[in-house]
Each structure stands twice: as structure tokens, then as C-alpha cells.
Image (tube, rainbow, N blue to C red):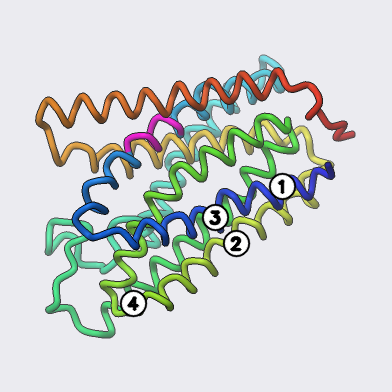
Amino acid sequence: MNLLVLIIIFTAVGGVLSVMAAAVFLLLPEQRRKAALPHGISFAIGALLAVAFWGLIPEAFEKVKPEQFQMLSGTILAGILGFFTLEKLLIWRHCHSGSCEAHGDDHDHTHSHSHSNAKSAGSLIILGDSIHNFVDGILIAAAFLTDVQLGIVTSLAVAAHEIPQEVGDFAILLDSGYSRGKALFYNMLASLTTVLGGILAYFSLEDLHSSLPFFLALAASSFIYIAVADLIPTLHKKTDIKTSIQQIALIAAGVFLICYLHDIAHNMGDYHLNLN
């Protein structure tokens, strides 16, 4: 199959289909939805960390010379700091209303907020998601341009973390005054930037194989940052033994599943493509 077609398909899996899955999830009764969401977050953490440390980082180091190891490590560090800065500037994830310090809870948007402030919060979510999804598309394409198997597991990891994230974004959009139809439309529009990023990356990165290890390092830093800075803190809201054991088990399940898929994919020699 043509590599561009594969990139389009799997960026759609990581973006558009994640939104659709989240939209179906929102049809559940609110109480059941709130009960299930932490389990999805736990699994996504394991998947993200497994792809970063089991797939992306080893693959990146295999493709550079020893004298470039420090530069590659620096790329991972710079990526983590860069995503922190981007999250701060765009109020990217949890602090959508610009008044987090006053309320103490990232998602504590009260009815006392003005209509204009609520709409602004919704716009920031859409903008932040569009940029983040665009970067995801570039990273998925970069992984595919390195190795088809790596691209597949990378897109699966993106989908794993996008679904619980999109559920949270839907909740904020609805709280900001958007109807369910408009929330779905704007979230779907933002998710299409994943495909756009993948297509643009295909044409701009295909002849730049020497840069691919650094894009893979950036992908790893993105996954590590999202898992550690955005998702893990949400698990600390409940500290009882039963919940903690469930969280650890689901994180481990995410790790083992991605490692298993990664190993299976590398044994599927028929999927190797000649990128030269």
C-alpha cells in the first residue's frame, strides 16, 4: 500500500476516529462516564510511555552516530520544555478559562463566569487541540517515514491518549455554552489537523531522513510530557488502595499491549516499504 495512504489512514485513526469514539462515550449516563474515564486515562499513560521508551527513543538512537547522542538527548529535553511552554502560552490542556489560580481546579468552571469568558475558554480549547493534533500528525508521519511498524504503534498510542483527552474537551466545550452538535463539529474540525500535519510532513520530510531521529525524539518528548504532566496528576485525586491497584494494573496493561504490538509489528516483514 502507498505510504501516503497509510499515513492518511492512521492519522485519521489518531485524530478523527478518536473524536468519534469520545462522542460515543459521551452518550453514556454522566455517572458511568465519570466512573470510566480514569480507567481510560490510566491505560493511555502506559501506552504513551511504552511507545516513547520502547519504540521511539531506541529507534532514534539507532539511526544516529554516537557523536550525535548528546544532541538527540538534548532534543528530548528541549521537546519537554517546549511542550510545557506551549501549554502555558495557549492554556493548552487544563487551564482553559484563564482563572485557574482563582478557582484552584483546572476544570472548575462555575456559572458565575461571563458568557464571553466561557466562549473564550472554548476557543482556546479548539485552538490548542488544533495545534496539538497538527503536531501529532507530523510525528505519526515521521514515524511512518522511518518504519511502517513504528508508525502503526505510534498512531495507536496517539489514539489511546486522544480518546480520554477528547472526552474532557467535550465536557469543557459543553460547559462553555456550545451545543452538543457544535462541540462535535469544532472538535472534529480540530482533529482534521492531524491528517493535515501528516500529509504536509510526508512531502516535506520524505527527503530529509537525517532529520527523522530528531522528530522521533520530539515525538517521545511529547508523549512523556503528556503522560507525566497532564495525565498522571489526574490519578492522584484518589489515593485509596483499591483505586491505586487498578491504576497500576491498567498502566501496566497499556505498557504490555503496546510492547506486544510493537514486537508483532516488527515481525511482519511484509509491511516493510522502500523509502528511498
Question: Of tags 1 and 4, which is closer to the observer?
Answer: 1
Task: Residue 138: give x, y in percent of width and height.
Answer: 64, 48
Q: Residues within 10 Å of mark 1 (few under 14, many from 20)?
A: many
Residue at label 3? 17
Task: Residue 267: give x, y in percent of width and height.
Answer: 70, 18
In the image, 259 versus 112, the foreground residue is: 259
- Give the residue displayed 49% in from the left and 59% down from the top: 20
Give the residue type that dot 4 points to. Ser
Question: Of tags 3 and 1, which is closer to the observer?
Answer: 3
> Is residue 197 within the magenta segment?
no
- Above or below, 43 against 33 in this view is above
Give the residue type that dot 3 points to. Leu
- Above or below, 3 against 259 in this view is below
Q: Determine whether the residue tagged by mark 1 lies in a helix, strand or loop.
A: helix
Q: Determine whether the residue tagged by mark 3 lies in a helix, strand or loop.
A: helix
User: Looking at the rendering, which quadrant does residue 217 occupy?
Assistant: top right
Residue at label 1? 7
Residue at label 2? 193
Residues in magenta, as a range: 42-47
Residue at label 4? 120
In the image, 141 versus 222, the foreground residue is: 141
Q: Which mark sits nearer the N-terminus, 3 or 1?
A: 1
- Give the residue displayed 68% in from the left and 18% down from the top: 62
